[in-house]
Amino acid sequence: MNLKGKTVLVTAGPTRERIDPVRYLSNFSSGKMGYAIAERALLRGARVLLVTGPVAIAPPDGVQVIAIESALDLLDAMQAHAPQADIVIQAAAVADYRPAQVSGQKIKKKDGGAMTIELVENPDVAAAVGKNKRSDQVFVVFAAETQNLLENAAAKLRRKNADFIVANDVMKPGAGFGVDTNIATILTPEGQTEYPLMRKEALADVILDRALALLEAR
Ligand code: PMT
């Protein structure tokens, strides 16, 4: 299905939460899932905004790239750009916590004993986007789980006020972080559909088809 005339905003990659000038907390997201969605949306005629954490892959030519580093940067970017989008898809892996203080200097090793870093909670960016979602927008989030996939994803779907959630069990071979394929279950408030292992581009098309169908039904 064609996305001509539609604006699709996709988030991709990890966030980095700084500890000091040389260290950060992050996760294993490569950006492949979000970049596949951006690429497929572009090929299908959409205007694409790609809000991306630091990754080692190149964005598709023709997308508008908004580079972010931390969860707080992501919040700013989404507040600025989400209102212009018809479809918002959050595939980025966002840190739930960040260091309470960012040291201005490299933290020095002390002799003996443990090192403790105090963490504070990051804002739930998706929940903020979901709260401000207009009735003419479609909002899609992901759930990266290692256990209780469906229960945890269903709770996130409600908490983030999304139209549907793409749940992936990141412990399964061929799913989740770093690989070119994924295995997903899509949950809506009405029900769920399980998809077999497929390339991330193919899952991107499934997600875009479902988002467009919802948009056109409004
Ligand atoms: O990048 P790849 O290597 O291709 O890997 C793909 C992926 C595993 C990163 C992707 O398929 C995926 O599952 N993305 C979501 C990762 C994640 O952060 O999941 P979560 O269950 O912690 O978060 C749920 C949703 O809320 C996500 O849409 C996330 O973007 C969002 N979130 C989470 C925390 C937070 N503070 N703010 C958020 O907006």
Image (tube, rainbow, N blue to C red):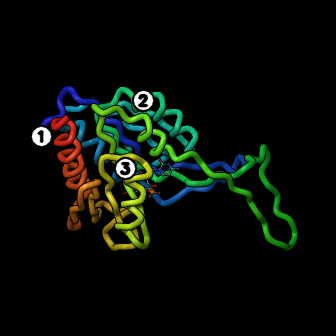
In the image, residue 26 above or below residue 214: below
Q: Residue at x 28, y 63 (%)?
A: 184
Crowdedness near tag 3: few (<14), some (14–19) or many (≥20) residues, C-alpha within 10 Å: many
Q: Mark 1 vs ligand 1: CB under 8 Å?
A: no
Q: Which residue in the rendered view is the most extreme toward the left?
A: 1
Q: N-terminal of the two: label 3 or label 2?
A: 2
Q: Amino acid at mark 2?
A: His
Q: In the visual, does 134 lie left or right of 114?
A: left
Crowdedness near tag 1: few (<14), some (14–19) or many (≥20) residues, C-alpha within 10 Å: few
Q: Mark 2 vs ligand 1: CB under 8 Å?
A: no
User: Is mark 1 in CB contact (under 8 Å) with mark 2?
Assistant: no
The residues bearing labels 3 and 2 have C-alpha atoms spaced at a distance of 16 Å
Q: Position of residue 48 (x, y in %)?
A: 31, 33
Q: Residue at x 48, y 36 (%)?
A: 67
The residue carrying mark 2 is 81
Q: Amino acid at mark 3?
A: Val
Quarter the C terminus occupies: top left
Q: Is residue 61 visible?
A: no
Q: Amino acid at mark 1?
A: Met
On residue 184, the disc is none
Q: N-terminal of the two: label 1 or label 2?
A: 1
The residue carrying mark 1 is 1
Q: Residue at x 53, y 33 (%)?
A: 76
User: Is mark 1 in CB contact (under 8 Å) with mark 3?
Assistant: no
On residue 141, the disc is 3
Ligand 1 image-quadrant field: bottom left
